[in-house]
Amino acid sequence: MQPTPQHSSKTRVVVLASAIWAASIFASRLIGLVREQIIGRTLGASRQADLYFASFTLPDFLNYLLAAGALSIVFIPIFLAHLEQGDEQRAWTSFSVIANFIVLVGSAGIALLMIFARPLANWVAPGIANPTDVDTLVRLTRIILPAQFFHVIGGLLSAALQAQNLHALPALAPLVYSAAIIAGGLIGAWYPALGAEGFAWGVLLGSIAGPFALPLLGCLRTRMRWRAVLSFRDADLKRYLWLSLPIMIGFSIVIVDEWIVKNQASYLAPGTLAYLQYGRTLMKVPIGIFGMAAGVASYPTLSALVAAGAIVQAYELLCRAVRAMLLLTFAAQVCLTVAGFEAVEVIWGLFANRFTAADTVQTASVLAFLCLGLGGWAAQSLIARGFYALGSTWLPTIVGTIIAAVFVPLYVALRRQEGAIGLAIASSVAITVYVMVLGWLQRRRFEREAAARGATLDETRGMLVAVLRMAAAAMIAAGLGLWLRGPMLQWLPGLTLAPVLLRAVLLCGFGVGLYVALAYLFGVRDLAELKSMLAHRLHDRRHLVEHEH
């Protein structure tokens, strides 16, 4: 069946938005690595680093209660519906009512958490008992808390821009945010008495300059009309609250995993939380580049297809996006597993005084086990958006909350037996189970939606078979790559820049090459589709260059 012009147009919109977000998130992850590198080289794997990372727990909790992570997912369909009806005034009225409600509730939440930060510190990190450390944790928390106000309001402003397919300024915001944290950290390094406070002040100033100011500028350019109105009877506010409520009150594993890890790591030796956080930072690079970019870019089009009743096409788009994203994510998992030591050493260890070779070994070991769940972390954002496009925010949250409750004892037990590695294993198992259950439930939901419209998904290629083949190829490639590490360390010993980089290139090249070959042997058709798409884009670019000349 030939694609219709409308379908081709939507595909081009997704491709363009994906390119913008992929470039932004790639740059954001790179600058994020620079940020974490400066944190690691300034604070090392120390108790000061543990306190800095733990200080984000209460601000993140407030961010979660305000459903900030789902602002675009919940608000875009509301705003978009009015724009598609040609009622721009009503669209901005909805924005005003929802934004003013968030300002009111968010300000109250920040004030309460500022007041009760000290008693809540025992909940955040119960294993930290030193009074001086507790004082530092409370002080850092109080600096970072107001940043959530600008993140949340900025998220709503970004959602309004994305609904109009204006992605550039929202995509740029994380870069400015990270740059401000880097600047704060450099000032802190220049004045050692500041310690982690330099980074904390950078978080606050960066949240104002990036996530808030840039989308605000973009909305002002679109003739934004933010009015001082607030009505609890407003239909759009009720819809927003109904869709956001499960995210606000449900403690899904996607959100609470990091809280549980920080809570449990506080019982371990100083620096352990830092190892887990540095490992998670490296793991987030492919998650952001592949998973977040695909999810953010495809969601408006996915929502539009569902709104138009094109359920089969929506599911096809979703499955195709998940498969393509995981094909690349598993390659990154192989690379981070076989050359994780080299990656950690280049980012934090080389030429550093505060990050030792032992710290590199510990972080790389944690990273390898965190990467077992890399595919799950990358896929969950995209799969959840399939439910959100259908107007279902309850089911993903309920499933995630049940899994979080069931798996908490596993975190505790593995922390007691295996320390940081045990926490990494628990995290990977929990997210993998969550994604598998959610993917199965999603297929059933789309089948029911299609049947209600007289259609079927029988001819639609799903995700599971292809993903299992990719995962098998990745596991075999990673295992053989780790086996190769022994001889490689004998051929290329040393911790200077040249041998570390050469080992990383060779190990990644071997692992990824083997993964691609195995995926081809296992019949992963998405490889051919990806090759065809890249060849088509290369041809288009060559044709454009020839036309310009």
Image (cartoon, grey):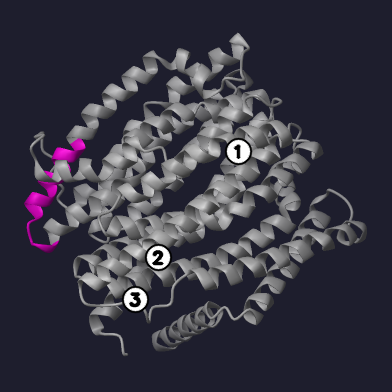
Quadrant of the rendered structure where residue 47 is? Answer: top right
Quadrant of the rendered structure where residue 469 is? Answer: bottom right
Under mark 1, the amino acid is Leu
Q: Residues within 10 Å of mark 1 (few under 14, many from 20)?
A: some
Q: Is residue 396 visible?
A: yes
Q: Which residue is mark 2?
A: 18
Residue drawn where x is 65% and y is 34% of the image: 413
Residue drawn where x is 30% and y is 65% of the image: 302
Q: Earlier in the sequence, mark 2 or mark 3?
A: 2
| Quadrant the C terminus occupies | bottom left
Q: Which residue is mark 1?
A: 410
Whether residue 220 sits left or right of residue 150 in the image: it is: left
Residue 94 lies in the magenta stretch: yes
Is label 3 in a helix, a strand or a loop? loop
Residue drawn where x is 89% and y is 54% of the image: 493
Nearest the viewer among 30 and 15 is 15
Q: Kindly report the secondary structure that dominates the magenta region of the rendered protein.
A: helix
Residue 279 lies in the magenta stretch: no
Q: Residues within 10 Å of mark 2 (few under 14, many from 20)?
A: many
Which stretch did the figure color magenta? 84-99
Return the x and y of residue 107 as percentages of the image width and height.
Answer: 27, 25
